[in-house]
Amino acid sequence: MKDSKCSKNVAEEARANAMQQQIDEHCVCSSCSSSGNDEESSLEYKILRGKDKIGENLIEIICGETKILVELGKALEGGDELSDIEKNVLNTKYDAVVVSHYHSDHAGLMEYKEDCPIYIGGGAYRIVKTVSEYRGKNIASNVVTYQNGKSFSVGGIKITPFLCDHSAFDSYMLLFEAGGKSVLYTGDFRFHGRKNKQKLLSRLPKKVDTLICEGTNVGSQKQCFSESELEDKLVDVMHKNDKPVFVLQSGTNIDRLVSVYRATKRSDRILYEDNYTALIAYAADGKIPRPDVFGDVYAFTPRALSGMRKELFFKFENRRGWRQIKKNTNFVMLVRPSMRGYMEKLHKEIGLQGATLVYSMWSGYKENEDMKTFLDRLKDLGVEIVDLHTSGHASEEDIELLKQTVLADEYVSVHTCPNSVE
């Protein structure tokens, strides 16, 4: 028994060492302190994941005995299984987790972390909560919301969130300050959306010790034209004929939803939001196009609903069923790959030859089997596929402008492809 126990301990130690080695391989460490003698005045950061990877940032901010985890995302291609690094951060005791926005590669593990406060923007939290409830899950009660420009403290670290533009609603840059030192983390951002970039740039600090900046588009050929330009291009598509126009976009891309709605209104059409997107728009609140406020926006459901989803759908006064939709084909409809059966049914009733589907997402999603099957089927039905998308991330020019505005002693790139930044 003693030998068996000893072997078990050795095996566990080996697994722990292997896990730590994997973490170390992804880890970049630095201190912003000018003096190593005073532990409490030392502001340090440690990049656990994201240095040579698009998305999935996991960053530690440390000052003395205070340790904060920045972002709590799920690997984009990890499936339901947790990686060793994800298991490690979930098992590590932090004083707090601070999340910049709700995309799953930044917030996808929130439901698993219950042993410390999780800070996230108020609007972002409403969307996280809505998505979780829609999927039959619950968000833990340890979530604390923050607001634009209002600083808060965790231990000896002061944190200031700055609202920025991104394809996720209510996204923030985060400034960490302690011991006279500072780290600005950009999260995901861009300057070609609908928010005023000068308003953000004027509020950011002019000097920091370390700037940790996203670099998704560094070295890429992705298009980064403005949302206003995209809106104009959508209007051109909608004016081609009076056939239906379908838009395939992320249900949580609120900026894109606004662009689609504005183009729809300019084209004298009505907008149909599927029940999922309508709930996201409702959670975003404010002036976001949604069926409970806008008279020319209607909720629809591509399939029979039951339980909580049915109750939520019938809360929308502006909703239309199958018979009403097919009466007038001069509409714009948001669709998803899971709606292939609905589209086939619509084709039998009104014919979709000459209709248009606007693909307004990252092109890489076309490699997914469900997306490929959906798009191929629509082509078979005579639907024209038009690619019209602009990146939700900063262009190289955006990044350079930020670096010129916020001077830093040290510049670190995350959320980027290997070797794209020296």
Image: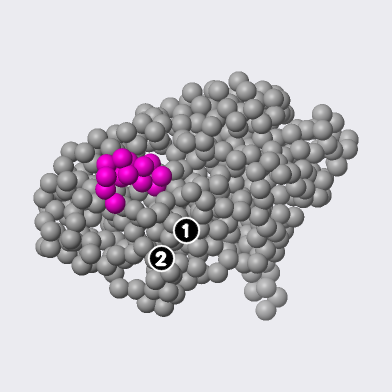
**Residue 139, x across and y down, in percent:** 58, 66
Indicate whether residue 20 is drawn in magenta.
Answer: no
- x 23%, y 61%: residue: 325
2 and 1 marks in contact (CB < 8 Å): yes
- Residue type at the position of mark 1: Tyr
Q: Which residues are magenta?
A: 257-270
Which picture quadrant has residue 89? Answer: bottom right
In the displayed structure, 410 sits above or below 311; it is: above
In the displayed structure, 87 sits above or below 158; it is: below
**Residue 188, x across and y down, in percent:** 53, 40
- x 23%, y 48%: residue: 245
Within 10 Å of disc 1 (Cα), the crowding (few <14, some 14-19, many 20+) is: many
- x 71%, y 25%: residue: 207
Which residue matches tag 2?
316
Depth check, front residue: 49 or 118: 118
Depth check, front residue: 380 or 288: 288
- Residue type at the position of mark 2: Phe
Callout in the foreground (2, 1) = 2
**Residue 59, x across and y down, in percent:** 63, 45
In the displayed structure, 408 sits above or below 416; it is: above
Tell which residue pokes out farthest to the top in this image.
404
Q: Is residue 230 left or right of residue 236?
A: right
Indicate whether residue 258 is drawn in magenta.
Answer: yes
Which residue matches tag 1?
282
- x 85%, y 31%: residue: 35
The image quadrant where one finds the C terminus is top right
Residue 364 appearing in the image: no
Q: Is residue 249 left or right of residue 115?
A: left
- Classify mark 1: helix, strand or loop: helix
Main SS of the magenta segment? helix
